[in-house]
Amino acid sequence: MRRSTRLFEIIQILRAATAPMTAEDLAARLEVSARTVYRDIAALQAMRTPIEGAAGLGYVMRGGYDLPPLNFDQEEVEALRVGLSMLARTGDSALQQAAERVCAKIDALHDPADWLRVAPWGAPADDPGRGCTPIALLRQAVREARKLRIEYRSGDGSRTLRALRPVGLIYHLDCTMLAGWCELRNGFRHFRTDRIWACDLLPDSFAPQAAALRQLWQDQSRWDEAAAASAR
């Protein structure tokens, strides 16, 4: 998380908090050290952000501090709530956590809508504690045009090592697929992320070819032919 993003998140967390939050509480939410939070709080206070408190006691946001409202009408807000809730069905835990942060910001500016419910059943969560590859790592590889080396188990149980140039992620209701140029098969392939048993983000970049590769994949896959269903 970039520092500017982290500072914004501290403001949002303190605005929504109903009691003082310690640096340790904030650090756990932001997945950084308490020392980093202390530095961030000091930087915000230096920018005249009305944060009050001290180390060991906790921090609060002085009343009256606000950010510009989100300019969405009621149906747009409800669409956002449903769409964000459906991220829980993708198995992408990092996106789900991001969605929860966005929902907290919406709740701070709009009336709650607890009558809108989305069933949580869908793709299995990418829990690293159970050996799952974090989908966030795969998104990073696509975003940064970095090669991946994966260990993949196909539907029949056979395992292969693949070197990939990842070009996209497809979120289905019951699984998430990684699309990439497979150097072993010398062509585009789609891989279920819950069958990726190991994954290394390589330093090799294919950024100069990324846009052309992605366009070629889109031209060849043709969504109406459901090419992504033929995972190998």
Image (cartoon, rainbow, N blue to C red):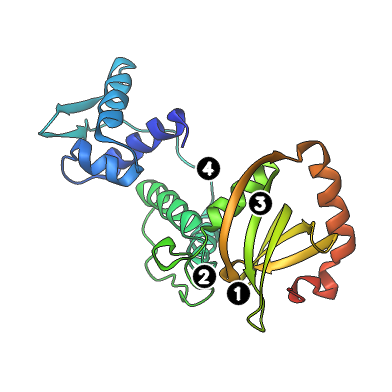
Is residue 40 shown left or right of residue 153?
left
Query: Label 3, label 1: how many angstroms apart (C-alpha)?
Result: 25 Å
What amino acid does circle 4 point to?
Asn
Residue assigned mark 1: 173
Q: Residue drawn 19% across and 40% down?
A: 21
Label ID, residue 71: 4
Q: Of tags 2 and 4, which is closer to the observer?
A: 2
Query: Label 3, label 4: how many angstroms apart (C-alpha)?
Result: 40 Å
Q: Of tags 4 and 1, which is closer to the observer?
A: 1
Is residue 78 shown left or right of residue 195?
left
Instruction: State the SS at label 1.
Output: loop
Q: Of tags 3 and 4, which is closer to the observer?
A: 3
Query: Label 1, label 2: how many angstroms apart (C-alpha)?
Result: 7 Å
Query: Label 3, label 2: how many angstroms apart (C-alpha)?
Result: 25 Å
The reply to whether dot 1 and dot 2 touch (C-beta < 8 Å) is: yes
Q: Residues within 10 Å of mark 3 (few under 14, many from 20)?
A: many
Q: Residues within 10 Å of mark 1 (few under 14, many from 20)?
A: few
Q: Residues within 10 Å of mark 2 (few under 14, many from 20)?
A: many
- Report x, y in % for residue 159: 65, 73
187 shown above or below 51: below
Query: Label 4, label 1: how many angstroms apart (C-alpha)?
Result: 30 Å
What amino acid does circle 1 point to?
Leu
Residue that sits furthest to the left in the current view: 57
Q: Work out whether mark 3 precedes mark 1 in sequence or the reverse, and give the earlier one.
A: 3
Closest to the observer: 4 or 178? 178
Instruction: State the SS at label 4.
Output: loop
Residue assigned mark 3: 148
Residue assigned mark 2: 89
Q: Residue drawn 45% across and 49% down?
A: 102
What amino acid does circle 3 point to?
Leu
